[in-house]
Amino acid sequence: MTGPDPGEVFYMTGHPSDHCPYFPVKMGGLNSRGEYEYIVFSQPLKHPTMVLARDLHKFEQKYQQEVYLFLEKYGFLSPIAALNTRLHFENATQCAQINRYYDQMQL
């Protein structure tokens, strides 16, 4: 979903108070179809920052170190920006809630 200002994206996690605009700060790894393999989103204060990848295993093997160095170089991992936490990679598909009722609906 597009954010209120040019270049912003709304990323919804399902929490009602999580309507924050994110800006794409880095994209990389073009695949054979010309699509990016990952995109890095953040907010103006550089926290929170998230990385979305098409293929988790490919990202871990080919791009994770590159992204980590980018985030460190440009201050996304600073103690002030990240509240003294370090980067943590998580498979968000495990967090997705599935409602089978809607899967069975025919429109």
Image: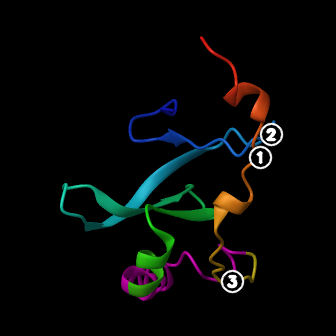
Q: How far apart in space, not on screen, are marks 2 and 1 (Cα)?
A: 17 Å
Could you tell which of marks 3 and 1 lies nearer the N-terminus?
3
Residue occupying image coordinates x 39% and y 35%: 6
Q: How far apart in space, not on screen, are marks 2 and 3 (Cα)?
A: 24 Å
> Where does label 1 land, which residue?
97
Q: Is residue 68 left or right of residue 10?
A: left
Closest to the camera, between mark 2 and mark 3, is: 2
Corner quadrant of residue 49: bottom right
Q: How far apart in space, not on screen, are marks 3 and 1 (Cα)?
A: 32 Å
In the displayed structure, 28 sits above or below 79; it is above
Residue occupying image coordinates x 50% and y 85%: 72
Q: Are marks 3 and 1 in contact (CB under 8 Å)?
A: no
Corner quadrant of residue 65: bottom left
In the rendered image, residue 99 lying in the magenta stretch gets the answer no
Dot 3: what SS? loop
> Where does label 3 land, which residue?
79
> Where does label 2 land, which residue?
17
Work out which quarter of the rendered image holds the C terminus and state it.
Answer: top right
In the displayed structure, 83 sits above or below 21; it is below
Q: Amino acid at mark 3?
A: Pro
Closest to the camera, between mark 3 and mark 1, is: 1
Q: Amino acid at mark 2?
A: Ser
* Relative depth, front residue between 25 and 33: 33
Part of the protein shown in magenta = 62-82
Q: Is residue 63 left or right of residue 14?
A: left
In the displayed structure, 11 sits above or below 42; it is above
